[in-house]
Amino acid sequence: MPNQRDDAADDSPADLPSLEKLDSPTGSPPTASLSSLMELENCVSNLSLAHEIVVNRDFCFQPKSPPTDSLEGRVTEIVHRAFWDSLQEQLNSDPPNYNHAVILLQEVKTMIQSLLLPGHVRLRAQLDEVLDMELIQQEVDNGALDLHRLAGYIINTMASLCAPVRDPQIRALRDLEDPVDLLREIFRVLGLMKTDMVNFTIQSLRPHLMQQAVQYERAKFQQILDKQPASLDNTTAWLQAAASEEVAAVTARSESSSPDSRGPVSATAVLNRAYMSLLRWEPQDQKYPETVLMDRARLDALGQRLQMLVLEASVLLLTNAQCGGSVFSLQGCVGKLRQTIAALLEGSHAREADLKGALLGLGETVLQQVTEALRAQGGAALPRESLDLLKGQISELWKQNHPVRTLIGERVQVFLQAMLQGSPTKRSPDLPAPLRLVSAELAEMGTAFGRIVHFNRTVFGPFYAPILRKLLFPPGEAETGDDSR
């Protein structure tokens, strides 16, 4: 499909995450030729696209159309309108001028041919017979061209090739009388059909792509590394920070038990700690590890969801502690509370001021819902002191070091680390009591996180291994336990 890869590369990271362009080290002379830079960019583009197809199960190409209120959108609209107005003038002239119409018919024929499969032998022969461009030109010269007859054949052919989802649009084509409108809509629907064909091909090939993806991505990244040796600098710094934290944690545990009980630091533990840090990555920090860049948008989204789940669980825990089990035992109370919390906290993770305001309003709403639930069930109202205390506790959750938020966050970290110990399909570990109210969302998020980590470790294990070996095993020591894959 023409230009689809270029279109995808131009989308926002949320649509199609891709490796950032790798600059040469500061001060290095511009020795790379233009051809080598283009080859590197093409390699990065291919790697990003292949990774997205394999990792994102919902991946599909979408027809690219610029926003109507953008400069590109306005220019595109003006150019398209001018083209079709010009065609309208040519067809309305006396005698009609079919020069542009013939060119469009040739393009329509080419587009339909691109949709044909090798088994469409008879259909291909029929297409060549009906849309014989030499014969059509002779009909134009003799004033005998019947556009509606050719359009009818084109629509019937499209109907036999299109996916069922396009049937309503094919039927709408049959109702058009104006030849310009008809040609314009034929082009639009054919473009959609080409996109459908590409997406169907991707879905059909995905099981085979999965088998080859690891070797393909590894080989492509090695090509990038050969051209840009500094392409692992951020990854090395990322693993080094995780190794330092893991060594400190192991040392602290050994000192709390027995000074002589400290064992070797596990490469797997370092990698897991490194991956966990990606869920808390500061957006302004540009030194993102190169090996995980293609998943940054997904990991950032998971980190935001994680933050919201921690806050939601914290609010529920505080409400339960202050109101007692009587409120949470009321039918529908917990579900309504959760909907309210999620709605009021949505989008508040970006700025601290937004989170403060959201939590202040949330405290008022929680008190109102709790009071109404008790009143509806004929229960006794909660003391004013308990309500004021609950409101104050909820409003203070914006602080990163809030005891309840810290506790819930630590429990979530333990849960996710436990999920990373096995394969992505392994059964989720049991959740501690405070998190059972958000168990479904947390398990879903943990599965998605584990799938990303597992695939990344499988692909980039050979690149991580020498870095971890150098960090964890000084020269001369036994290099055991290095299981970075």
Image: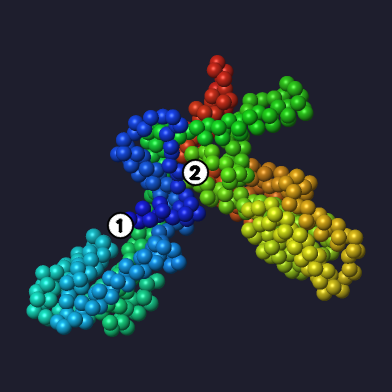
Instruction: Identify whether 182 is placed above or below 418.
Output: below
Look at 68% across and 47% down and name the residue there: 412
Res. 415 visible in picture: yes
Instruction: Give, as a three-letter code, the residue at label 1.
Output: Pro
Q: Residues within 10 Å of mark 1 (few under 14, many from 20)?
A: few
Look at 58% across and 30% down and name the residue there: 240
In this rendering, position of residue 464 left or right of residue 404: left
In this rendering, position of residue 71 left or right of residue 271: left
Instruction: Give, as a three-letter code, the residue at label 2.
Output: Leu
In terms of sequence position, does the residue under pointer 1 or pointer 2 come before the other?
1
Determine the image quadrant of residue 64.
Answer: bottom left
Name the element at disc 2. helix
**Could you tell me residue 34's position as x and y percent?**
31, 39
Instruction: Identify whether 120 is placed above or below 301.
Output: below
What residue is disc 2 on?
Answer: 293
Residue 2's disc number = 1
Determine the image quadrant of residue 151.
Answer: bottom left
Q: How many numbered tags mark residues here? A: 2
**Could you tell me residue 422's position as x and y percent?**
58, 42
Frontmost residue, 52 versus 397: 397
Measured Cα–Cα span from mark 1 to mark 2: 26 Å
Of the 4 image quadrants, the one containing the N terminus is bottom left
**Could you tell me residue 346's position as x and y percent?**
65, 60
